[in-house]
Image: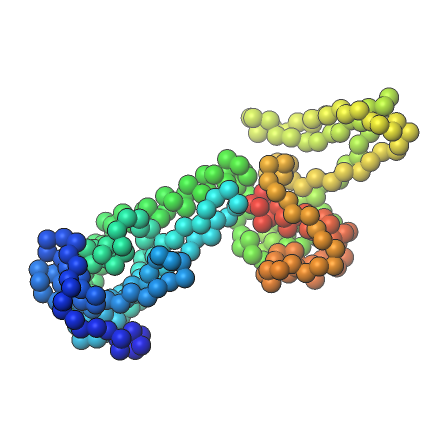
Amino acid sequence: MKKYILTLSFAFLGLVSFAQDINLSDSVIYFDNKPVAYYVKELNESTPHYNVYIISMNKELLIAAQVVKFEAPVRELKPFYYYEVIFQKEKDTFSIYHEGQAFAVELASLMKQYKLLDGDKISRSSLFRFKKDYSGNASLKAKIKDYENYLDETRYFSEQTVRDRTKPVTIVNDKIIMQDGKKIGIVVTGTNTVSGGMTTTYKTVLTRDGSKAVEGTMTENNNPNSGPVEFTQVVLPTNRIVDASKVIIQPKVKNIKHKRPDNLFDISLPLNKVSRNEDLLWQVCQYVENYLM
């Protein structure tokens, strides 16, 4: 923090007014024309977002509001940004999703509204009321919930095992799919039967009432003399078959390391030397990265 304090400008000219009793210069916050704290904006890589630091008049750090990027879990969604508001001496952190006016202005307004400043320190009782009443945290939870609802509708996210999705994936005995020490799915193999020039494919499905059923699909067989063909499916712990037809599954390129050093397949492969084949592991990792399982 020293470098931020040293670069403070103590100019009292050029005030920016955003409320009748709250003003900001390029470094000072005023309540009713009284200087109450310094602030510093630090350009964050997520332009035009800024990290904001609130510093008491006796040059002690009170609040650090740091920009955090919420990564979009799937391609159809977009990432967004929120703030981790850290109350330094109180060792307390509060997450806020904010849209609208510049966050330095918003933060100064909140300090005034909730009477967070008690002289040159943070009022603990006011901080408690702020965390209880301010809607910014609820807005962040609602934003994340919107993403979860989308994944439920398109990926059956609510039926998937809760775990750390960045951990390596292992396939035990070519059947049980594990991640973060938890079972996340099962590999099921079957055979397409050939009859009279037609191929019948059977698969287990869930009906609307949650019971299991077997669904058969018949397709024309261009080579009636061919033998039975084995197929592989992946099912969730709820026995729902993973359907990847609506997402983009990247093809596996042989002998080429992925660009991302934390690519799920690359960190999982060393733990799956006894797995039946790498193609199955690639497929499963693609399912995990696309939130299909």
Give the residue at x 80% y 34%: 191
Give the farthest residue toward the top.
196
Q: Residue at x 50, y 48 (%)?
A: 73
Left or right: where 186 falls relative to 85: right
Residue 76 higher or lower than 113, as above or below: above
- The image quarter in which residue 129 lies: bottom left
Q: Quadrant of residue 24?
A: bottom left
Location of the N terminus by quadrant is bottom left
Side of 7 where 12 appears, left or right: left
Q: Is residue 256 visible?
A: yes
The answer to whether residue 128 is seen in the rendering is no
Please provide percent x and percent y for residue 28: 18, 67
260 or 224, which lies in front?
260
What count of labels does the image hold?
A: 0
Residue 200 in the image, given as x and y percentages of width and height: 78, 26
**Residue 69 location in percent, x, y?**
42, 56
Measuring 66% from the left and 27% from the top, which residue is drawn there? 213
Front residue of this view, candidates 248 and 89: 248
